[in-house]
Image (spheres, rainbow, N blue to C red):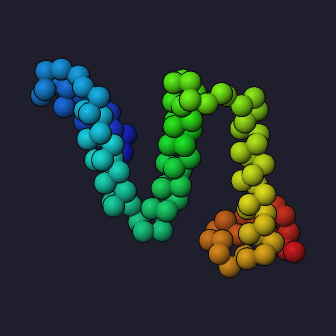
Amino acid sequence: MYVMVGFATPCVVRNMAGCERPWHYYLPGMMGGAMVLLEAPGRQLELGLYCFTRAMESWWRTMVKRGHFNNLPHGDVLVFMLSMGTLMTIYQNDKQTIASHYLSVMTRFFGNN
């Protein structure tokens, strides 16, 4: 559903307007975002977190392309290290904040501390 809305809406808007403008892509973004309301409440946060990481990556690449930032060599490794450090700190100190499914996977990999 998300993909269909995301790909079809710009085409429909472009055909209706008879031209292509940058704002034509805001509408599919809003409509695709509204599709999250159709998801189960427990899955909405997961989907939001996934989209947030894609948005951060897109924002970073845009800023590098426009010359606002220099690209960091192996920056993905740095982000991975920070993410794992955060996850392991939460796992060590505050397990009840982790969703049960993720906690069971982490316990399988890292054991009980």
Give percent across and percent down for residue 75.
Answer: 72, 36
Image quadrant containing the C terminus: bottom right
Q: At x 65% / y 27%, what residue is drawn?
A: 70
Hey, which residue is sitting farthest top in the picture? 19
Q: Residue at x 73, y 77 (%)?
A: 94
Indicate left or right for 55 with 71 as reference.
Answer: left
Q: Position of residue 52 (x, y in %)?
A: 51, 50
Task: Residue 76: name its quadrant.
Answer: top right
Q: Quadrant of residue 3?
A: top left
Relative to 96, is 77 above or below?
Answer: above
Q: In the image, residue 39 lies at what x, y percent?
A: 38, 61
Q: Measuring 75% from the left and 52% from the top, which residue is drawn there?
A: 82
108 left or right, relative to 18: right
Q: Is residue 43 visible?
A: yes
Q: Residue furthest front?
A: 68
Residue furthest bottom in the image? 96
Question: Where residue 30 sits in the image (x, y, percent)?
Answer: 30, 47
